Image: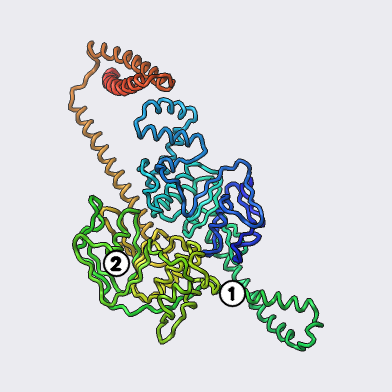
């Protein structure tokens, strides 16, 4: 296979913090590689290094000569003043540039520029390319091309950036969290798009279904080293567990040997200088191996939720809309004790607004939401990540509580709680500004959970969290003795956590579905198939009805044996007229593609060709009627 990218012995550190050392891997034509690591291990840094946006201490990054590379950053930046169209079509590809100019001229009715660009579009054979681009833009719901880029939300800018890299049709695509800010429909479209594409791929994502269905190789950075698995995410889980089990056996064996060696090292301390050097070296090697962190597999968080009564919340006849956009219409719901509800739907259907109404941040237009007296909310919001960057991580948590109650009189210190969330003692005493984006999200989640809530409301909790943290959170939520509402586009997360769904379909159409997300998708596919079958059956019946009606009309009408003299003459004239009209149409089409017409001529001939098409259709229908009688 053709090598697209080769990374050799790459090393990167920030001061005393070593992110990775001697990383070596390659990507060949057709390979789709998923990169997995804990937050703070350097995933985004590695992608930035490969894309040439960040330096490194040692090693080499080599691309195949003239390789087209597209890079989607986690937080893309565009120069202020650009329109959405300009941002979408920022590319060195001449075809893309031509299409951008053509779309701009078309949207502003610039006839003079269109005249020149029609010739260029033909020269580059850009029409099919343009259709593919419009498909990408429409699937990502990018429609307002004239809007300024600085007016967009972070999620909208991410979608524009994604459209930009897909439009440029690279040979190697580097994606940092591509599914963040995509709704379920967009995520599934992108999954299918990449699945059909032949592009090579290097990707960081927390979406495990996406990894499983798109990637054919997984690489993992663990303890500053790289491990490679030739398979999808399911294969990776199986083989990683085998590696972890082998490591744990080795660590246990090292511990046993260390005890023996320790006894030997302690004997006769006055003769230490005469001990065999190889025995001393072996001791320190064993000590390092034995002190290596054992992978415990599952991390249990047994923080006890505070007592919650039988009354949680009751919504009665709730209405909410913004102008013509309906969010809730006569919405009624009684939330049950210990219920775990997932909320799904496309962007703009009102999911976050519903949560904000529940939390009292947005008032309904009418109706009531009555919340039980014992309910203590823990609210993780999309825009709640606000810390004093100069504080230490441990101090952020201690400001909330020095200790966390585990129930039965047991307690856990703030430091122990942070360790459950994978913050090492060293990281706990680092400043917040040194944390990665994912680590800050993990710290925010920690501050929500440690307040001992009994009703968790999590709005997009999976964005920017690594897969390992998601596993910890999933286990916590599965064992959580309280109520949960989760808004998420992460299908895997929803399948593991919730027991039923509210599906927001837009315009206040909300379906209560008993099951997880995969159950809902299976049900929806059956429903869609049934609706399609019913529509086809209806169309067939309508067609049969029309045929029978026409047959009855034909039978009741007097049969005409042959054309009259006048009709025969009309029939002959129609043949000649249609030929002349077709010839005129072909001549005008040649003139329009010649590029030599003036603006006035271009407009006149465009109008004439529209008239010709209507006349030809009309005369052809009459010719067919007469030909049936003649036959």
Q: Are marks 1 and 2 in contact (CB under 8 Å)?
A: no
Which mark is on residue 371?
none
Position of residue 407 relative to residue 536, above or below, is below
Residue 522 % position (x, y) = 38, 57
The first of marks 1 and 2 along the sequence is 1
Q: Nearer the viewer, mark 1 or mark 2?
A: 2
Disc 1 and disc 2: Cα gap in Å?
Answer: 41 Å
Position of residue 262 relative to residue 191, above or below, is below
Q: Quadrant of residue 47?
A: bottom right
Residue at position x 29%, y 40% from top? 540
Residue of label 2: 359
Residue at position x 19%, y 29% from top? 553
Residue of label 1: 294
Q: Quadrant of residue 373?
A: bottom left
Q: Which part of the image, by quadrant, shows the C terminus? A: top left
Residue 601 % position (x, y) = 35, 19
Drawn side of residue 70 relative to residue 323, left or right: right
The residue lying toward the viewer, choosing from 3 and 161, is 161
Drawn side of residue 140 relative to residue 502, left or right: right
Q: Secondary structure at mark 1?
A: loop
Residue 251 % position (x, y) = 64, 75
Q: Mark yes or no: residue 628 visible.
A: no
Residue 596 % position (x, y) = 43, 19
Residue at position x 64%, y 53% from top? 7
Label 1 Cα neighbours within 10 Å, binned few <14 / some 14-19 / many ≥20:
some
């Amino acid at each position: 296979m053709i090598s697209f990218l080769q990374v050799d012995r790459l090393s990167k550190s920030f001061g005393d913090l070593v992110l990775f050392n001697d990383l070596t891997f390659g990507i060949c034509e057709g390979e789709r590689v998923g990169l997995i690591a804990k937050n703070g291990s350097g995933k985004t840094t590695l992608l930035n290094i490969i894309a040439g946006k960040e330096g490194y201490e040692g090693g080499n990054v080599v691309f195949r000569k003239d390789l087209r590379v597209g890079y989607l950053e986690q937080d893309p930046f565009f120069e202020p003043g650009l329109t959405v169209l300009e941002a979408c079509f920022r590319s060195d590809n001449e075809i893309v540039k031509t299409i951008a100019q053509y779309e701009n001229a078309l949207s502003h009715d610039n006839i003079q520029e269109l005249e020149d660009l029609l010739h260029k579009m033909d020269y580059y054979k850009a029409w099919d390319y343009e259709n593919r681009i419009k498909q990408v833009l429409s699937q990502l719901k990018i429609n307002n091309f004239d809007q300024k880029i600085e007016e967009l939300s972070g999620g909208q800018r991410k979608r524009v950036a994604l459209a930009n890299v897909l439009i440029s049709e690279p040979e190697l695509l580097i994606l940092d969290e591509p599914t963040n800010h995509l709704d379920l429909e967009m995520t599934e479209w992108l999954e299918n798009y990449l699945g059909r594409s032949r592009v090579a791929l290097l990707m960081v994502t927390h979406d495990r279904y996406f990894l499983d269905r798109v990637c054919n190789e997984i690489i993992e950075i663990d303890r500053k080293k790289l491990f490679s698995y030739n398979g999808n995410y399911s294969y990776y889980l199986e083989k990683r567990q085998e590696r972890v089990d082998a490591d744990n056996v080795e660590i246990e064996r090292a511990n046993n040997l260390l005890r023996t060696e320790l006894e030997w090292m302690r004997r006769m301390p006055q003769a230490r200088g005469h001990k065999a050097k190889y025995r001393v070296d072996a001791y320190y090697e064993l000590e390092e191996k034995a002190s290596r962190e054992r992978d415990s597999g599952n991390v249990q968080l047994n923080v006890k939720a505070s007592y919650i009564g039988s009354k949680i919340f009751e919504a009665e006849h709730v209405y909410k809309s913004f102008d013509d956009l309906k969010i809730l219409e006569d919405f009624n719901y009684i939330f049950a004790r210990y219920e775990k509800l997932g909320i799904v739907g496309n962007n703009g259907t009102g999911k976050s607004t519903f949560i904000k109404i529940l939390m009292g941040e947005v008032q309904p237009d009418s109706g009531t939401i009555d919340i039980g007296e014992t309910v203590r909310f823990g609210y993780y919001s999309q825009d709640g990540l606000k810390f004093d960057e100069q504080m230490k991580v441990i101090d952020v948590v201690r400001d909330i509580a020095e200790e966390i109650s585990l129930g039965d009189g047991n307690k856990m210190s703030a430091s122990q709680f942070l360790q459950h969330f994978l913050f090492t003692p060293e990281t706990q005493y680092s400043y917040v500004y040194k944390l990665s984006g994912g680590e800050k999200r993990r710290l925010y989640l920690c501050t929500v959970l440690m307040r001992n809530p009994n009703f968790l409301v999590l709005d997009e909790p999976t964005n920017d969290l690594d897969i390992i943290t998601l596993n910890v959170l999933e286990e916590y939520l599965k064992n959580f003795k309280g109520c949960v509402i989760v808004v998420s586009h992460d299908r895997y997360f929803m399948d593991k956590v919730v027991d039923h769904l509210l599906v927001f379909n837009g315009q206040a159409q909300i379906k209560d579905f008993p099951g997880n997300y995969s159950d809902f998708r299976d049900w929806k596919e059956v429903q869609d198939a049934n609706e399609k079958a019913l529509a086809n059956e209806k169309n067939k019946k309508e067609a049969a009805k029309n045929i029978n009606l026409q047959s009855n009309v034909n039978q009741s009408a007097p049969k005409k044996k042959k054309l009259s003299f006048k009709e025969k003459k009309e029939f002959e004239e129609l043949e000649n007229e249609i030929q002349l009209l077709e010839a005129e149409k072909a001549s005008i089409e040649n003139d329009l593609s010649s590029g030599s017409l003036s603006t006035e001529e271009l407009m006149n001939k465009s109008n004439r060709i529209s008239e010709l098409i209507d006349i030809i259709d009309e005369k052809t229908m009459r010719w067919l009627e007469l030909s049936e009688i003649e036959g």
